[in-house]
Image (cartoon, helix red, strand yellow):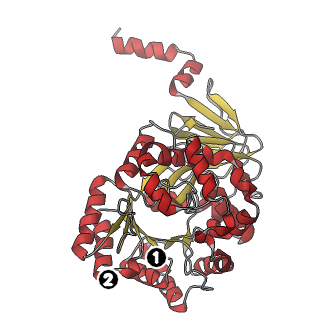
Amino acid sequence: MKKSTLLWALVLSLPMSILAQQKSIKALVGGTLIDGFGSDPIKNSVIIIEGERIKEVGTVETLPVPEGAEIISTEGMSVLPGLWDMHVHTMINGHANYTYWDKTYPPLFENVIMPSSAHQLLMAGVTSARDLGAPLKESISVRDRINNGEIPGATLYVSGPFIQHKPYPGTEDFRWGVNSPEDGKRKIKKLADAGVDVIKLIDHDQMTMEELRAVVDEAHKHNLKVVAHGHRPEEIRRGLQVGVDCFEHTGLSSAPKYPDDVMEMIKERTAQMNKGPLFWCPTVEGLYNYEYTRDNPEKLDNDSWHLGLPDSVITDIKNSFKHPDRLPYFQLTPSRRPTLQTKIQQLLDAGVVLLVGTDSGIPMKFHSQSTWNELDVWVNEFGIDPMYAIRAATYWPALWTGVADEVGTITPGKYADIIAVDGDVLRYISLLQDVDMVIKHGKQYK
């Protein structure tokens, strides 16, 4: 008998339990599955995970569990794809003084600050995130170490530095100015060659149209999508004219709503089916919840945001918001807050597809808490359908990022990025504040 035949005969004679162990098979059994596609949840679900990927999905009636698989009971739980947060800043951790932070902490970004942010996101059930604005070398390093399994964290899709007309003093390492069309092309090429996943564009109403078009065209030439601020009407107008791929923030400061001409341009864009959906990441939670946090600061004592940070940094961050009512960052927020729901409704009415993102890392907003807070505001304050909100944090982000064939839904063949919470998340979206189970690429982290 040939050696290969003999080996195969031995394999066939091994008990199924040993084979299951060798292949690292897990079975999530009994929960209500929200798969990310938006249809009715699947009751009494069974998800078979083999190695890093989902092998089969069914129910306890239709899908037998392989002998020897590790059975993880999800009875009484909602099971859903790992969440995405489409707007995070891993280089900041809630400190209230940016100028001080930018001077003090860059030496700790690569090995302490950014890894801790990514780990906190993961433990909050965020298995993928778009990191929009940080120094280039550190962004690539942290992303790649996570991807290589060297450190735990959400899978990051990084922009590296902001691209803008002129960097603010002292921020040149993570904000790159553009002073001509040729300069814009050079900087985008440098980012593309370094391996960024996306381009982050801000203050583009201060650029010339030639500079702006050069930046966006060069990015698209390198198959990089462009994310752009929508803080000011002219940023939106120009962004639409040059074909940016996603707008960020529900801006316009305290103005009550988007101008009529901007809304007409948005509707003109959403009518063009050949261009696909127009995506928008409104990041409302930080503004909407500021007054509550200011008046109920006990929530700042939640130690989930301490994960991975030295005591000295934790103390420094705490001291920075000792007086939440005095923070310059939020002084206009009480005037802005009432406008947020109106603007979100304008975007929804115009056919825009919203994505869940939070600006996580801004003052008093932590990577361990921001994402569920955003979902909670959408659903419980603005009346957005919970299934829409969940898809805005699962299906649509994966599609936008170009990885929908790998993640974003619970589908056979995709990576096993799966979370679960005790109870009915469609009825009580705030259950996501304490995710009970986190699996990323088949590995259980929580």
Front label number (1 vs 2): 2
- Residue at image x 70%, y 48%? 434
Residue 317 % position (x, y):
59, 53
> How packed is label 1: few (under 14 Cα within 10 Å), some, or many (20 or more)?
few
* Residue 23, visible in the rendered structure: yes
Residue under label 1? 273
- Residue at image x 56%, y 44%? 312
Q: CA distance from mark 1 to mark 2?
A: 25 Å
Q: Earlier in the sequence, mark 1 or mark 2?
A: 2
- Residue at image x 58%, y 70%? 329
> In what element is the residue under mark 2?
helix
> How packed is label 2: few (under 14 Cα within 10 Å), some, or many (20 or more)?
some
Q: Residue furthest left?
A: 182
Residue 389 % position (x, y):
64, 63
Residue 308 % position (x, y):
55, 41
Above or below residue 38? Residue 154 is: above
The answer to which quarter of the image holds residue 356 is bottom right
Q: Residue furthest bottom?
A: 260
Asked whether 141 or 417 is in front, the reply is: 141
Q: Which quadrant of the figure contains the C terminus?
A: top right
Q: Are marks 1 and 2 in contact (CB under 8 Å)?
A: no
Asked whether 21 or 364 is in front, the reply is: 364
